[in-house]
Image (cartoon, helix red, strand yellow):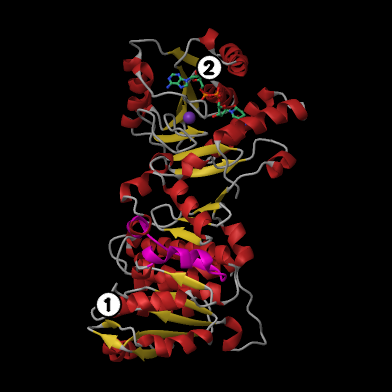
């Protein structure tokens, strides 16, 4: 799904009004209807407090109050944190209506906070309509107090368009912000809502259509996309009744070292698990026996070894072997010795599509020109630490600016990047950015990344484009993680459990 920045939402709004003659108040009414529809689905929402700010977000809140006022068994109280004569034009319309309807409105001037606290404590649902996309400066004074009171209350909090205090372009908290249980956002997901730290405030995000003409939405260009089920279904590689193992691609997975046999086992098994036809794990001789014991369906190959890591001599065997593969995965558990570095060089100069992970990423640092000159599709799967090693930036710089830095790297070296964080990004060389919102803290564990690189490699081997392999891989992996966490909690799951989760992820994606 397309993700937009607030300025684009304003543009859509303006064009809907000017080019389609849709009165702005109609959009507000539509937005309010969507929120009320959701409120009606919440049985506990009997005592509702709506907190309204001065702009159109507050206007939405007043429009919601009008619709709720007509419902039985729901008590509605409105707190207006603005003087009525300074409301937006549409907000004023609703203010006049609800006043006439007899809705209980409390104007929140200095000193009325005690009253607010009293009402919030009795409420079962708080509607946060203080600020939306029009927030321009840090929250201070009475607004800060109101947000603090909302956060202290026990009631369920539903934010209108965004949690108040969140800036919706970069996802920053301006001063303070509402912690919502859910956010109903209008028109499209706003970029900021998907990013850190905002996503810790939004709760579940629901996107609703408020009647902006479809043609306008389709026309508007955005480099940002949310990785969601509908899109991912389209990427599922085809399975043919008339096929054999050669149909689904050969993967060579290079990695492993003494004391790290698990990483390459996980990665190579993951490639097979998502449908690749034939997978070979190429490992240093000293761990080959161990690998043979651990692997059943994956083939293995011992390579020349020096002190438990791959040695330079491994290249003689690897060079012809790479030519027989459809794709190469390199890095999991490989180590960073000089032999490993030579092997990375060999893969880079090959004409095979490849997935580069873990230690191999760090070894790329002095080979960036080779990376840039590759003709075959290349996918890099760093976490911020590995990207820091690759770029010479600090981890903090990457965490503060993940989109820009990953985009710059992807376009400069013509590679598809998968930046692994709690909001994993897939970035194409063209600059398109795909954001994943699934996954959980149970996946922050050694071995998870190895499964991911294997999954992506297995999809790439089946003929998907690099970006599609990366997006679908990230989706399946994080979806699997969420299913596993449901069964085992985020504490007690192991990356090997992801294999079972991947089965569920496929089933639900296919629609079994
Ligand atoms: N197409 C749509 O998506 C529609 C969205 N709607 C809603 O409108 C808001 C955006 O409304 P806008 O009036 O532009 O902004 P806000 O309501 O967020 O507030 C602006 C208001 O607040 C003042 N202000 C800004 N920052 C601060 C601050 N830190 N402290 C105090 N005051 C502040 C600013 O000066 C303005 O006066 C969108 O989110 C939707 O909820 C429409 O209802 C329908 C179409
Ligand atoms: K809000």
Residues 434 and 297: in front is 434
- Is 183 magenta? The answer is no
In the rendered image, the residue lying farthest to the top is 85
Q: Which residue is mark 1?
A: 260
Q: Is residue 101 above or below residue 8?
A: above
- Is 371 magenta? The answer is yes
In the displayed structure image, the side of residue 283 where residue 483 appears, left or right: right
Tell me if the residue at label 1 has its CB under 8 Å from ligand 2. no
Q: Which residue is at a point 35% across and 10% down the rendered structure image?
A: 110
Quadrant location of the C terminus in the rendered image: bottom right
Residue 453 picture location, percent across and down: 43, 70
In the displayed structure image, the side of residue 239 where residue 83 appears, left or right: left
Q: Which residue is at a point 60% across and 17% down the rendered structure image?
A: 94
- Image: magenta residue range: 364-388
Distance from Cα at disc 1 to Cα at disc 2: 67 Å
Residue 348 picture location, percent across and down: 46, 73
Q: Quadrant of residue 461?
A: bottom right
* Element marked by disc 1: loop
Task: Rate crowding at label 2 as few (under 14), some (14 to 19) or many (20 or more) other CA atoms within 10 Å.
Answer: many
Q: Earlier in the sequence, mark 1 or mark 2?
A: 2
Q: Which residue is mark 2?
A: 103
Q: Which residue is at a point 56% across and 51% down the rendered structure image?
A: 431
Residue 106 picture location, percent across and down: 44, 13
Residues 95 and 282: in front is 282
Observer able to see residue 511? no
* Element marked by disc 2: loop
Residue 15 disc label: none
Q: Nearer the viewer, mark 1 or mark 2?
A: 1
Q: Is residue 411 above or below residue 339?
A: above
Residues 278 and 230: in front is 278
Q: Is residue 424 above or below residue 242?
A: above
């Amino acid at each position: 799904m397309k993700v937009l920045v607030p300025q684009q939402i304003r543009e859509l709004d303006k064009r809907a009004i000017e080019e389609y003659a849709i009165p702005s108040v109609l959009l507000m009414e539509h937005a309010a209807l969507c929120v009320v529809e959701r409120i009606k689905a919440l049985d506990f929402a009997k005592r509702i407090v709506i907190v309204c700010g001065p702009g159109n977000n507050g206007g939405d809140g007043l429009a919601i109050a009008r619709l709720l006022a007509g419902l039985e068994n729901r008590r509605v109280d409105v707190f207006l944190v603005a003087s009525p004569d300074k409301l937006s034009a549409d907000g004023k319309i609703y203010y006049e209506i609800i006043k006439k309807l007899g809705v209980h409105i409390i104007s929140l001037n200095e000193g009325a906070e005690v009253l607010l606290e009293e009402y919030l404590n009795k409420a079962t649902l708080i509607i946060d309509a203080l600020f939306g996309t029009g927030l321009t400066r840090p929250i201070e004074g009475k607004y800060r107090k109101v947000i603090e009171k909302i956060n202290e209350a026990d009631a369920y909090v539903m934010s209108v368009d965004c949690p108040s205090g969140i800036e919706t372009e970069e996802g920053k908290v301006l001063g303070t912000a509402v912690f919502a249980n859910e956010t109903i956002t209008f028109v499209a997901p706003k970029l900021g809502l998907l990013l850190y730290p905002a996503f810790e405030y939004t709760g579940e995000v629901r996107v609703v259509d408020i009647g902006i003409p479809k043609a306008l939405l389709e026309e508007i260009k955005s480099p940002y996309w949310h990785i969601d089920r509908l899109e991912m279904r389209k990427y599922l590689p085809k399975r043919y009744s008339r096929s054999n193992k050669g149909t689904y691609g050969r993967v060579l997975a290079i990695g492993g070292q003494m004391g790290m046999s698990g990483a390459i086992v996980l990665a190579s098994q993951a490639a097979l698990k998502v449908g690749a036809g034939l997978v070979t794990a190429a490992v240093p001789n000293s761990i080959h026996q161990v690998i043979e014991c651990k692997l059943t369906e994956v083939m293995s190959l011992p390579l020349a070894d020096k002190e438990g890591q791959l040695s330079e001599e491994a290249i003689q065997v690897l060079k012809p072997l790479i030519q027989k593969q459809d794709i190469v995965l390199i890095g999991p558990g490989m180590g960073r010795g000089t032999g490993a570095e030579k092997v990375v060089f060999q893969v880079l100069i090959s004409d095979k599509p490849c997935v580069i992970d873990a230690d191999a990423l760090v070894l790329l640092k002095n080979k960036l020109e080779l990376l840039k000159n590759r003709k075959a599709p290349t996918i890099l799967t760093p976490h911020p630490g590995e990207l820091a090693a690759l770029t010479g930036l600090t981890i903090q710089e990457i965490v503060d600016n993940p989109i820009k830095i990953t985009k710059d790297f992807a376009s400069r070296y013509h590679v598809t990047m998968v930046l692994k964080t709690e909001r994993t990004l897939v970035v194409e060389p063209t600059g398109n950015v795909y954001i994943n919102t699934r996954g959980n803290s149970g996946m922050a564990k050694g071995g998870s990344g190895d499964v991911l690189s294997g999954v992506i490699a297995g999809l790439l081997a089946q003929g998907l484009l690099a970006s599609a392999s990366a997006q679908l891989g990230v989706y399946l992996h994080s979806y699997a993680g969420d299913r596993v966490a449901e069964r085992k909690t985020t504490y007690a799951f192991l990356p090997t459990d992801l294999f079972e989760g991947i089965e569920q992820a496929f089933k639900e994606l296919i629609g079994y």
